[in-house]
Amino acid sequence: MILCLESSILGGYLSNEVPGLVTGQLHLAGLGKPVRVELVGNFMRDIAGCRVDFHNPLPNGDLDDVAWLSPTQVGFTGVMTASNRVSKLPRRRRAGDTVLPDPAGLKNLLFFEWFNEQSQRILIQSWHLHLRVSAPRWQLSAEEDALQFRQARARRKHFLLASSNANDGTSPALHAPGMADPFEPKAPGGDPFADFGALESRSALASSDDKLPPDPTKRAMALAQELRRFERLLSQTHEVRNRPAVVQLLSTVADLAAHLVHVLRQFSAADKSGWHYLVIDLEQSLPLFSAALNATDRLVQQSTPGTDKTWLGHVQASLLNIELRMRELLGLLR
């Protein structure tokens, strides 16, 4: 289950002043007591080591989401940053969530994500919260930040796959901080309290292979493989045939996936004259894949007994992977 709290937040704080631990309190509309937060993990590099206090000038309580929330949030961090750059604001879950107009151009969003013991993904993503960020007590290196981002992405994928199989042997390790973290980096960073200059020196000593720019051709092939996987998933079930709107959306996305696979197989990193057309294809396709992911999320949340949740979980994970790989490839081609 995904719970979005940005409209219900009255105020609170989250602190990452202790490395590897995020603690804090959230005051939510509709709750008489603050929600206590204790998570394993760190903020991203922009606010790592800081305490972030926030206040919502225009709260609009969502009692449906708040009712599902445990008063003590224990789990693992996902992506937690105060500088999430987006061109479009998150889709409102219902009309009238805010009276503030959407700002033009790129937006800088506060984005807090974590996964708790109740198998829930908690999101706070907003541009209008009033923030106060303390000076950092310690700092992440660029290498550690990249490791942490990959770790957060793996947790998100694992959440989508495990949400429909909460009783299997892999889910508890994700949600119980007392157990081993299956996504802990194999090459953890050093002392986070080390001198900032020492961190930069360590990054400078990284191998030359790590400094090589990502290969657009490999990224294109990885995206093509994920699109093919998505096509195969849609051919394996009749799960959504009783929902015409969802069927039409997924059918459109499947046709688009087939087209993109053909385009990506012809992609050549050496022929930069063709990059522009691929960028246009990806930019036009991304909103449809995002809409398909949102529709699949709703199917999971509204599932009835007998629903093939395993298949829906695989579709969710595939669509999320496609969206992430599209954004990554677009970043390389632009």
Image: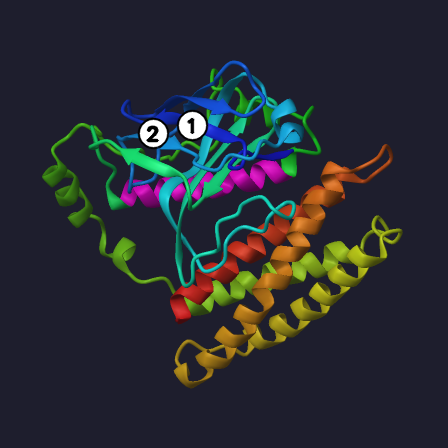
Tell me: 218 left or right of 196. right
Q: Examine the rendering and report whether any part of residue 68 can be seen.
A: no
Q: Is residue 212 above or below residue 74?
A: below
Describe the element under mark 1 as helix, strand or loop: strand
Q: Residue at x 22, y 35 (%)?
A: 139
| Chain part drawn in magenta | 143-160
Q: Give the residue type at disc 1.
A: Gly
Residue visible at 38% across and 21% down? Answer: 23
Would you say the residues marked 1 and 2 are in contact, meaning their CB atoms lie under 8 Å apart? Answer: yes
Task: Count residues near mark 2 (Cα–Cα under 10 Å), then give few for <14, some for 14-19, many for 20+.
Answer: some
Q: Nearer the viewer, residue 178 or 225?
A: 178
In the picture, residue 143 is in which quadrant?
top left
Q: Quadrant of the C terminus?
A: bottom left
Q: Residues within 10 Å of mark 1 (few under 14, many from 20)?
A: many
Residue 11 image label? 1
Give me the residue at 85% from left, 57% from top.
244
Left or right: 216, with 174 as reference point? left
Q: How many marks?
A: 2
The residue to which callout 2 is attached is 53
- Main secondary structure found in the magenta portion: helix
Q: Is residue 257 magenta?
A: no
Instruction: Name the spot of residue 89 as percent of width and height, x first.
Output: 50, 53
Mark closer to the chain start, 1 or 2: 1
Measured as percent of width and height from the top left, residue 247 is found at: 81, 58
- The question of residue 147 being in magenta is answered with yes
Q: Position of residue 185 (x, y in %)?
A: 38, 35
Residue sticking out furthest to the front: 99
Question: Which amino acid, by three-letter code, is at mark 2?
Answer: Asp
Task: State the quadrant of the N terminus.
Answer: top right
Residue occupying image coordinates x 84% and y 48%: 239
Q: Position of residue 133 (x, y in %)?
A: 27, 34
